[in-house]
């Protein structure tokens, strides 16, 4: 095991310096130079003065070794229809979202329903960093270091009943804070869902931050789901409710167009969207911009080893 010197004198920290150091540490860790050791980024003290930092420990087992998408793209090219349908809208308008106080309720078919303040939710399990590939149904992708913990840690706490077969996620829909909610493009609130085994899969991350910082509002603050083997729309942002159900929940994109967006929405290069191929993708932030070469999309977005067994025997052309 090799330890890195994480001693930083507070006076030496500039946001840019911290950012650059984090990037090189994450790169080194992802490249395997720290072996299997979990690498705590910085001491809590180093960040105590800045409440926007989230202390997280890299989980190399679940982290991609690919080059990460620069922060500026992660926070400026977004889909968050509550703030408009243009990629630039969330960064421009999400500042009106009030993320404190924030209450989330975990309800439905569980033995121990919970209503939790966001700060209590943050403390349910240790914060991990996972560098995940994210693939949008529109054909672009990013590689993002997310901070959170496995949703399974929260699910175990509420003790689902045997009758609970699915989990529904409901996002906030408040016209006062979210200018996009006046549009009728979605039957608000935004809803998503997973099958119970998908929700319990360790890859499914209850997410509070990215790049070691509290989630930017345009990325779904203060809490969102991240499901890296599914198209981006399954990863609901700014959630206020998690509900356990027996029936498959209705989901927003499936309601908009069931032929184009199924419940499962696993990344699958062999199943085309009715209007376009899903065989390739374009990495956002590539130095070559729109001229960047398309790269091949991988089955289950490259997470087949961890998730394929959940779908054995299912016709994925039918259950898209
Ligand atoms: N509530 C809500 N969640 C949402 C969306 C949305 O419009 N509203 N868009 C989804 C889509 S299509 C994608 S690709 C991802 C984008 O997440 P990012 O902006 O953090 O990259 O968020 C998903 N979660
Ligand atoms: Mo998306």
Image: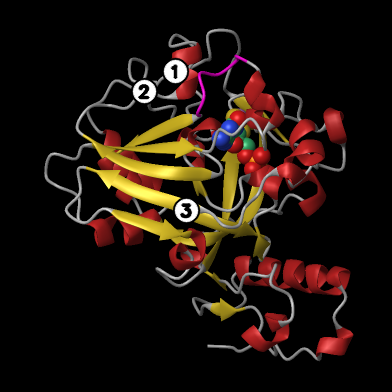
Viewer-side residue, 211 vs 242: 242
On screen, residue 164 above or below 249: below
Dot 3, crowdedness within 10 Å: few (<14), some or many (≥20)? Answer: some
For label 2, count other residues whose C-alpha is less than 10 Å away and answer few (under 14), some (14-19) or many (20+): few
Cβ(mark 3) to ligand 1 < 8 Å?
Answer: no
Q: Quadrant of the rendered structure where residue 180 is?
A: top right
- Whether residue 217 appears in this view of the structure is yes
Q: Is mark 1 within 8 Å of ligand 1?
A: no
Visible in this render: residue 304? no
Q: Secondary structure at mark 3?
A: strand
| Residue toward you, 35 or 96 | 96
Q: Which residue corresponds to mark 3?
A: 103
Q: Which residues are magenta?
A: 184-189
- Answer whether labels 1 and 2 touch (C-beta < 8 Å): yes
**In-image side of 279 versus 292 (left or right):** left
Image coordinates of residue 66 in percent, x first then y, are 65, 53
- Picture disc at residue 254: 1
Provide residue 175's location: percent of width, then percent of height. Answer: 63, 30
In magenta segment, residue 188: yes
Q: Position of residue 122 (x, y in %)?
A: 49, 66
Label 2, label 3: how far apart the Cα atoms are: 23 Å
For the image, the number of numbered tags is 3
The answer for how far apart the CA atoms under marks 1 and 2 are is: 7 Å
Upstream in sequence: badge 1 or badge 3: 3
Q: How is the image coloured?
A: secondary structure
Identify the residue shown where x is 47% and y is 23%: 252
Left or right: 25 in relation to 312: right
Q: Which mark is residue 250?
A: 2
């Amino acid at each position: 095991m090799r330890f890195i010197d994480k001693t930083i004198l507070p006076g030496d920290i500039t946001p840019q310096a911290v950012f650059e150091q984090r990037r090189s540490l994450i790169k080194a860790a992802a490249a395997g130079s720290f072996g299997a050791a979990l690498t705590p980024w910085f001491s809590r003290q180093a960040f105590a003065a800045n409440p926007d930092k989230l202390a997280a420990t890299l989980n190399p087992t679940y982290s991609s070794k690919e080059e990460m998408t620069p922060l500026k793209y992660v926070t400026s090219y977004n889909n968050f229809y509550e703030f408009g349908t243009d990629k630039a809208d969330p960064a421009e308008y999400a500042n009106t979202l009030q993320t404190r106080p924030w209450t989330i309720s975990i309800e439905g078919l569980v033995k121990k329903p919970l209503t939790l303040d966001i700060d209590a939710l943050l403390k349910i399990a240790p914060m991990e960093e996972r560098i995940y590939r994210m693939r949008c149904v529109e054909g672009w992708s990013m590689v993002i270091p997310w901070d959170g913990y496995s949703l399974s840690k929260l699910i175990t706490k509420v003790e689902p009943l045997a009758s609970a077969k699915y989990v529904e996620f409901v996002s906030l829909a408040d016209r006062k804070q979210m200018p996009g909610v006046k549009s009728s493009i979605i039957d608000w609130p935004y809803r998503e869902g997973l099958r119970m085994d998908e929700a319990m899969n360790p890859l499914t991350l209850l997410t509070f931050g990215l790049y070691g910082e509290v989630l930017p509002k345009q990325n779904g603050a203060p809490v969102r789901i991240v499901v890296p083997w599914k198209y981006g729309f399954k990863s609901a942002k700014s959630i206020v409710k998690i509900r356990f159900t027996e029936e498959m929940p209705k989901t927003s994109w499936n309601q908009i167009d069931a032929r184009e967006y199924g419940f499962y929405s696993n990344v699958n290069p062999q199943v085309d969207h009715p209007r376009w191929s899903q065989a390739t993708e374009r990495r956002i932030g590539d130095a070559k911009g729109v001229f960047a070469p398309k790269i091949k999309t991988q089955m289950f977005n490259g997470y087949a080893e961890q998730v394929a067994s959940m779908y054995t025997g299912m016709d994925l052309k039918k259950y898209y």
